[in-house]
C-alpha cells in the first residue's frame, strides 16, 4: 500500500511544478517522504526546487519601516486578500511595526503584551479580528538598530531591511545605493550574505544532488566532478547576496557595486546583514473559493 495520498501528490506538484505522474512516481520511490521525493525530482532534472521551495501560502502583508536609526520588518497574516487591502488592517500592521521599533520585544509572545494605543497588542489584535471578521495572526518580526535601508514590494508582498557599516550615511548618493541593495534583496531572494556563510552541510547536499543530476545527463563521473564544481560556483551566485549579479548591471556583482560606490564617494561601505520576509512564505494556503463561500452564504 502506498504511504502517501492524492493530497500529497498535489502538494508535491504545487511545490515543484512537475507533472502528476512524475510526482506520484517520486513519492512511490521515496516511500511517501516528501523531502526525499523533491530531492529525487531534482536529481532527474525535473524540478527547480530552489525557486519553488517557498511558495506564497497565505494572505496578509509585510511592512518594513525605519525610525531614528532603528528598523523593523513585520508580517501579519489574514485569511483573504480583501483584508490585506483594508486600510484599517494595513494601519494596524504599521502600528505593530512601530511597537517593535520602540520596545525591542524578544518574541511574538512578548510583543503581544506590549502597549499599542492604550491596550495590549493582543487585545488590539482580538479587536481587529472581531471587527474585520477574519482570523489575523502576527507571524514574525525582525528589528535592527543601525544604519538601515527598508523597502516594501507589491503593497506588502515582500518586505526587506538591510543594515550597512558605513561612514557615508549622510551622503544622498549612499541612500540611492542602499535602496538599490534593498531592491536587489527583494528581487533576487538571497539566502546568505557571503559564500563563507553557507553551511558546509548545505553545500555537500547540493554537490550530491548536482552529481546525481549530472550523471543522469550521461556524463562520466570524472567529467561530472568538474561540471559540478562549476555549478557550485554558479550556485553561490544564486544564493549569496554579495556574489549575485547586480540587478541593474549584471556585468558586475553586488560586492563589486558596493566597492565601486564606496570608492566613488570616498568612504567606507559594507553590508552587515539583511532580512527578507515574503508574505505567506511556507504557510498552507486556504483551498476554498472565497467567492463561492460568499455566494453560499446569501442563498
Image (cartoon, helix red, strand yellow):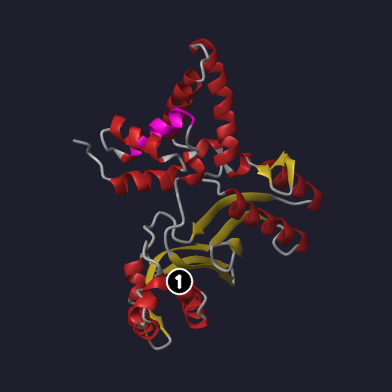
- Residue 275 visible? The answer is yes
Q: Position of residue 20 (x, y in %)?
A: 40, 40
Element class at badge 1: helix
Residue at image mark 1: 100
Other residues around mark 1 within 10 Å, as few (<14) / some (14–19) / many (≥20): many
Whether residue 36 is visible here, answered yes or no, is no
Side (left or right) of 8 relative to 67: left
Whether residue 113 appears in magenta in the rendering, the answer is no
Quadrant, the N terminus: top left
In the rendered view, tell whether residue 268 sits above or below residue 48: below
Residue found at the very far front of the displayed protein: 299
Image-quadrant location for residue 254: top right
**Which residue corresponds to the image point at 55% horizontal and 52% vertical from the top-left?**
273
Image quadrant where residue 105 sits: bottom left
Where residue 280 appears, x then y in whole percent? 44, 60
Residue 24 at what x, y percent from top left? 34, 37
Q: Name the residue located 43 percent from the left edge and 87 percent from the top edge.
A: 117
Question: Which residue is at 46% across, 57% downward?
Answer: 56
Position of residue 293 relative to residue 128, above or below, is: above
Q: Residue at x 37, y 73 (%)?
A: 293
- Residue 39 magenta-highlighted: yes
From the top left corner, tell me how far across and down residue 32 is, in percent: 27, 38
- Front-most of residues 133 and 287: 287
Quadrant in the picture for the C terminus: bottom left
Magenta stretch: helix, strand or loop mostly: helix
Q: In the orientation shown, which residue stands out farthest toward the right?
A: 264
Q: 239 or 66: nearer the eye?
A: 239
Q: Which residues are magenta?
A: 35-45
1 or 279: nearer the viewer: 1
The residue nearer to you, when weighing 81 against 205, is: 81
Amino acid at each position: 500500500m502506498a504511504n502517501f495520498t492524492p493530497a500529497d501528490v498535489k502538494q508535491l506538484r504545487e511545490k515543484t511544478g512537475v507533472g502528476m505522474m512524475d510526482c506520484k512516481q517520486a513519492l512511490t520511490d521515496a516511500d511517501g517522504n516528501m523531502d526525499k521525493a523533491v530531492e529525487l525530482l531534482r536529481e532527474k532534472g525535473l524540478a527547480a526546487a530552489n525557486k519553488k521551495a517557498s511558495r506564497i501560502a497565505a494572505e496578509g502583508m509585510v511592512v518594513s519601516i525605519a525610525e531614528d536609526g532603528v528598523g523593523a520588518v513585520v508580517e501579519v497574516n489574514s485569511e483573504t486578500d480583501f483584508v490585506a487591502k483594508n486600510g484599517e488592517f494595513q494601519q494596524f500592521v504599521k502600528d505593530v511595526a512601530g511597537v517593535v521599533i520602540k520596545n525591542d520585544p524578544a518574541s511574538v509572545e512578548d510583543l503581544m503584551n506590549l502597549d499599542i494605543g492604550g491596550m495590549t497588542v493582543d487585545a488590539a489584535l482580538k479587536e481587529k479580528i472581531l471587527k474585520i471578521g477574519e482570523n489575523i495572526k502576527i507571524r514574525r518580526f525582525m528589528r535592527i538598530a543601525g544604519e538601515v535601508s527598508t523597502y516594501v514590494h507589491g503593497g506588502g508582498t515582500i518586505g526587506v531591511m538591510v543594515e550597512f557599516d558605513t561612514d557615508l550615511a549622510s551622503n544622498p548618493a549612499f541612500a540611492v545605493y542602499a535602496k538599490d541593495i534593498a531592491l536587489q534583496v527583494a528581487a533576487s531572494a538571497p539566502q546568505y550574505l557571503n559564500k563563507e556563510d553557507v553551511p558546509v552541510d548545505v553545500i555537500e547536499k547540493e554537490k550530491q544532488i548536482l552529481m546525481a543530476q549530472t550523471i543522469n545527463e550521461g556524463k562520466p563521473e570524472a567529467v561530472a566532478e568538474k561540471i559540478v564544481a562549476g555549478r557550485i560556483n554558479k550556485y553561490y551566485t544564486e544564493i549569496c547576496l554579495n556574489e549575485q549579479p547586480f540587478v541593474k548591471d549584471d556585468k558586475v556583482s553586488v560586492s563589486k557595486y558596493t566597492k565601486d560606490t564606496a570608492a566613488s564617494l570616498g568612504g567606507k561601505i559594507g553590508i552587515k546583514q539583511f532580512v527578507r520576509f515574503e508574505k505567506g512564505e511556507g504557510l498552507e494556503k486556504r483551498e476554498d473559493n472565497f467567492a463561492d463561500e460568499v455566494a453560499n452564504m446569501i442563498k
